[in-house]
Image: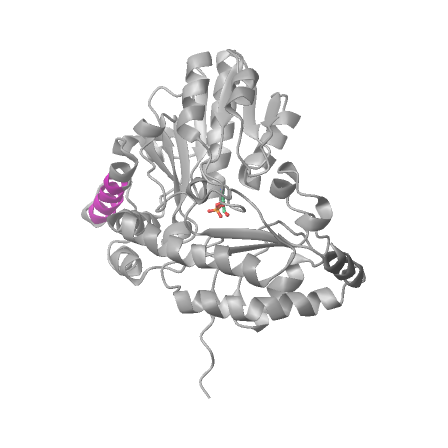
Amino acid sequence: MAAERRIYLDHAATTPLDPRVLEAMLPYLREHWGNPASLYAEAQEARRGLEAARRTIAGILGCRPQEIIVTSGGSESDNLALRGAAYAARRQGRGEQIVTTAIEHHAILHTAERLEQEGFPVTYLGVDSEGLIDLAELEQAVSEETALVSIMHVNNEVGTIEPVQEAARVVKEKSPRTAFHTDAVQAIGMLDVDVGRLGVDMLSLAAHKFYGPKGVGALYVRPRTPFLPQQLGGSQEKNRRAGTENVAGVVGMARATELAYGKFDARNAHYRALRDRLFCGIPERVPYVHVTGPRNLSRRVSNNFSACFEFIEGEAILMALDLAGVAASSGSACTSGSLEPSHVLTAMGVPEDLARGSLRLTVGEDNTLEDMDRVLDVLPGIVSRLRSLSPAWPERQAAGAQG
Ligand SMILES: Cc1ncc(COP(=O)(O)O)c(C=O)c1O
């Protein structure tokens, strides 16, 4: 009997490498392996590939190629944006405050915490029950003393699209010299990320979230943004990030961006159709489910479904789904045995108990409506089996039956 096809629904964690991306990368692994910084003939092809890739990525972001620093991925881009702007402000003797949100990825939050330990005052903006920041709160938090504001474009757990364009405008009106960074790691391929339209000074991306290779990313930096390089050594990336570039990786990232934006509308429509089936089907078939993130689906990135299930641990659902052939995520960070409820859900006001029952399904190119139907078939059974093991469940059912 043929094994049933596995269904991968964790595209926010990473995506498979598109075969066309691999194809574009191979010549830079096999033949053009020279160091792009060298002057001889062997190096020239590598340099040409790197610079052509930079032009492609710049075309998508609407910036100039020299405004892109290639990095080792989203985490490095985020670290570099925060530390680069913070230490530039300190060196120039300007205000050192940093403003960010409580629901950022840990690449931002842990960097902000470290900067706090290093003496930079950090303000964390709250969010509403759907994960949206409040522009009035942002305006209040920012002053001439603010070195940097960092607000993510799309939340990786609940898919909320933050009003980055409006936020950048608010910041610039209040304090034109304050730098504005956005972590757009979860936005690429699903939202327009033109840096001019968004009005941002820095933007992070990571290739493996949109069918490119892992371990490569980029940071856009607008000219004249106060920025102090953090990784020192050679003069690569115009002295802003030392180290020989991952040429094949950058070429792959460029091909992946091209593919993502080449069929932008079709891809989003496909994702929405799949995601909407989960949105209708799951609450209909499973009782005591609370959708997390925006209910207005236009405020939500096209590939994300997230919800909390009462009376169960998200991790238990994941394990059962895995056995049923479905790869999913709880969307929350868990470290060796201690299951911390997600900082995103708690910032949104989800009670801790409920936050422990979170599930995130993020769809991708290869998913089909039949895949969604299979999830809808297996999930109710999994949830009721797990709930039957919860001591509080019979009471809740009885209360539900009366009410
Ligand atoms: C919003 C966001 N920022 C940053 C990162 C980190 O990216 P990377 O894994 O490429 O370091 C991720 C990855 O999950 C993310 O979702």
Left or right of 120 on screen, residue 220: left
Whole-percent x, y for residue 17 in the image:
37, 59
Left or right of 266 on screen, residue 168: right
Whole-percent x, y for residue 260 in the image:
30, 50
Instruction: Check the image and report above or below for 35 versus 108.
Output: below
289 or 35, which lies in front? 289
Residue 364 seen in this snapshot: yes
Whole-percent x, y for residue 80 in the image:
47, 33
Q: Which residue corresponds to the image point at 22% horizontal and 41% vertical from the top-left?
A: 39
Residue stretch in magenta = 43-56
Q: Which residue corresponds to the image point at 70% horizontal and 43% vertical from the top-left?
A: 351
Outermost residue on the bottom side: it is 1
Q: Is residue 54 magenta?
A: yes
Q: How is the image coloured?
A: one colour
Residue 70, located in which quarter of the rendered image? top left
Whole-percent x, y for residue 344 in the image:
60, 41
Residue 47, located in which quarter of the rendered image? top left
Instruction: Check the image and report above or below for 51 versus 363.
Output: above
254 or 262, which lies in front? 262
Magenta: main secondary structure:
helix
Instruction: Check the image and report above or below for 94 versus 7.
Output: above
304 or 81, which lies in front? 304
Q: Is residue 101 magenta?
A: no
